[in-house]
Each structure stands twice: as C-alpha cells, then as structure tokens.
Image: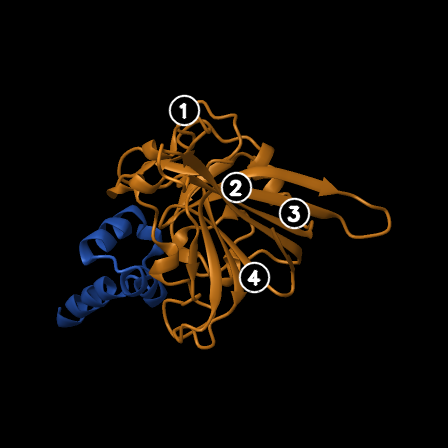
Chain colours: A orange, B blue
Amino acid sequence: MAYYVGKDVDVYLSTEHETCKIIEHTDFKIRISDGATSAAAANVLAYSLADLGEAQSKFSDVTGVDVSIGTQDEDISYFGVRNVGKIEVKNDTSVTVTMKKKDRKFLQMYQGVVDGSGHAEDGVGGHPARWGLTELTNGAFRIQGGNIDPKSCVDADDATLTTYGFRVIVAFKDDNTGTTGDGAAIVIPNCTLSEVTHTTSNEAADEETVTFTSQVKPIITNGRRTSADTSVAFSSDSTTQTALTLV
Amino acid sequence: MADKKESKKEEKVAKKAPQWLIDKLIENRGWSEEKFQKYLDRHPEQLE
C-alpha cells in the first residue's frame, strides 16, 4: 500500500464510456446523460472518458490517497519440478481517496436512487450507481444495478469493449508540456465504488473517504495528454475502454 | 433573392460542431467522421 498526501497527486474520475456521464437530476434521482462537456456542471456525478483529465473530472480538496496494488496467484506444483508455478489469476487494486466533504456527490453514487424509466438497465431502478454503465443499443445508455457481469456490459458502438464501472487515474507527476512523456500516472480501469464513509467533527471540516476497487490490470503510463496542454484530457493510452477479453 | 439564398446558406454553415468538440472526439479520440456524425445526430443541442 502506498499513501500519498493530497497535494502530491491528482486524482481523476470518469465513467467507462466515451461520452456518457452520470448526473443527479433535479428530483435527486440519478440519471445518465450522454454528451462530452467543455466545462464543469454542478449536477454531474461522473464525467465521461472524453473529459477524463480535464479540470472538471478531478477530485478537489484531496487530503490523502491510498493506492493498494496486489494480485491473486494460483500455485501449481509438479512432481520433479522444484519451482512452483505462480499463475496470475487476477489483479486486486484499490484506491482510497480522502477529501474535504463539500457536496453529496459520492453519497449519491453510493446510496442514491437511479431513475427507473430510461436510466436504469432493469427499467425499475431504485439502486445506486456503484457499478457504472451499460449500453443496450447504440445510444441507449443505462446505469446498471450490479447484476450484470463486466463481460456483458458492452459498448454498443464497439462490441469488443466494456463499459463496466468507473475509471480512476492517479497522476503522480504531470507531463511537462502534455506531450513530452515525462509524467507518471496509474490508470485503474473498471473500478466499482466499494465504500463511502463520512466523518463529522465539530472542530474541523467534514471529510469523506471514497474507495474504488478493480480486478482489471492497472495501466502505468507517462501521463501524456491528447495535445501539448496539461489541462486537456489524457491521451488514448489512458482513456481507451478495456477489451472484453480483459475483464 | 440572392441575399435570401446567402442568408440561408449562412444559417446552415453556422450549425456546425464547435471546435472543442471536434478536437475532443475527432482529433483526440480518433473518431471517424461517420461516428462523429452519429454522435451529432444524438446531440443537436451541441451544435453551434
């Protein structure tokens, strides 16, 4: 486990779809909203991959970040062979972000209610938005209730890619110009929102802790952006959706 | 008559995708024109 102070790293969050984001409607229900954005909007809970890396997708007032990386191996021994075969079964990565609490964004994603009509995959809704999106047919995005396996959350545009969960990027060092390739970041794809806790105190600012976990192999990148500008989205090596064969 | 035609033309030209959207989806994400057009059909509100 590696612990970082909030001022040392930048953390970004998005859904796993190129343009579809998750919002809170005026009736406080959670809805999908397709469309890339050019600036922050107050009601957005998670922006799309096209916005990942821009200011609106970044966590603010972060005080601490824990990154925990691990794998589960399967040990296979054979007669006459001394070494044990360590076969990697899956990765186990989690990111815990502690930040000053200023809105109900993460509580909504963790325990809010998805609008059933046209926004929930099952058409009923009532569940939170911890497991990301799915796309039934082209443009028919839905928030899923955690009852679909990642291989079945398919991007209708490209049936080889998954839309399961969220994507978190922890940027340790920004790229100098955006395209130099001297930055450092870890990309954790297909995360589920596994825990949200909230601490109140009468002497200090309220804090919340949000944990994302993923079993998909993380990507270590040089934090390149899509153009020579450090405020634009991350380049395609960090923002390409995961292939179905890898989830 | 010519003026009228011209103004109609201008209206058509004005309804195009904003540069930030073109940069974001075609330049940066490598979308094809066809895929981008499909996206615009879903999002007429994002046209300038």
Question: As shown in the figure, which amino acid type bears the numbered disc 1?
Answer: Gly
Between the C-alphas of marks 3 and 1, the distance is 28 Å
Q: Are marks 3 and 2 in contact (CB under 8 Å)?
A: no
For numbered disc 4, what is the local secondary structure?
strand
* The one of A154 and A28 positioned closer to us in this rendering: A154
Q: Would residue A143 be visible to someone looking at this image?
A: yes
Specify which label sits upstream in the sequence, 1 or 2: 1
Image: A23 above or below B19 = above
Specify which label sits upstream in the sequence, 1 or 4: 4
For numbered disc 1, what is the local secondary structure?
loop
Question: As shown in the figure, which amino acid type bears the numbered disc 3?
Answer: Asp
Identify the disc placed on residue A123: 1
Identify the disc placed on residue A213: 2
Q: Given the image, what chain letter belongs to the residue carrying mark 3?
A: A
Q: Which residue is mark 4?
A: A10
Specify which label sits upstream in the sequence, 3 or 1: 3
* The one of A170 and A68 positioned closer to us in this rendering: A68
Locate residue A52: give its quadrant: bottom left
Q: Would residue A139 be visible to someone looking at this image?
A: no
Which is more foreground, mark 3 or mark 2?
Answer: 2
Residue, x 34% and y 48% (percent of image)?
A241
Q: Which residue is mark 3?
A: A103
